[in-house]
Image: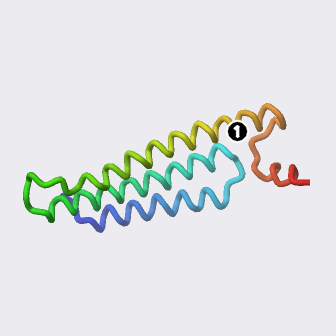
Amino acid sequence: MMPINYYIFLSLALFAIGMVGVLTRRNAIIIFMCVELMLNAVNLLLVAFSKMHYLSAGSPFTTAGTDGQLFVFFIMVVAAAEVSVGLAIIVMMYRNIHSVDVNFLNRLKH
């Protein structure tokens, strides 16, 4: 098994790329893709820590290691709901204003 440091660095890099994408992009679809990238970075870290905890338990009959995987399952369910609602909002926004630029939404406040 690879050291946990590799997983931490990969997860940190993926999360940082997602964060930069959310903060700098104006296209709503790319913003949602970057949010999904950040959620997958957290999932990778949860599974890596779950596996590390399972290996440190010692006994092959223990249930250690399932907690992180359960959290990953719930994160994936929430991400699927977020994508379905978000894409529905983007489709309605495109139908009404013919753009997916999130800066245009600031003009709708007034």
Q: Residue at x 48, y 60 (%)?
A: 15
Per the image, label 1 sits on a secondary structure element best described as: helix
Q: Is residue 25 above or below residue 83?
A: below
Quadrant position of the N terminus in the picture? bottom left
Q: As drawn, which residue projects farthest toward the top?
A: 95
For disc 1, the marked residue is 89
51 to 30, vertically: above or below: below
Give the residue displayed 23% in from the left and 55% down from the top. 65
On screen, residue 71 above or below 83: below
Q: Position of residue 67 (x, y in %)?
A: 29, 55
Question: Among all residues in the image, which is located at the extreme right?
Answer: 110
Residue density around tag 1, few if under 14, some if 14–19, many if 20 or more, within 10 Å: some
Judge from the rendering whether residue 94 lies leftward or rightward of residue 33; answer left or right: right
Q: Tell me which amino acid carries mark 1.
A: Ile
Describe residue 86's horizontal placement relative to residue 100 as left or right. Answer: left
Q: Residue at x 20, y 57 (%)?
A: 64
The picture quadrant where one finds residue 91 is top right
Q: Where residue 100 sits in the image (x, y, percent)? A: 74, 42
Q: Position of residue 19 (x, y in %)?
A: 56, 61
Q: Nearer the viewer, residue 36 or 69?
A: 69
Of residue 12 and residue 50, the one placed in the foreground of this image is 50
Residue depicted at x 87% and y 52%: 107
* The furthest residue to the bottom: 5
Q: Position of residue 43 (x, y in %)?
A: 39, 53
Left of 46 or right of it: where is 19?
Answer: right
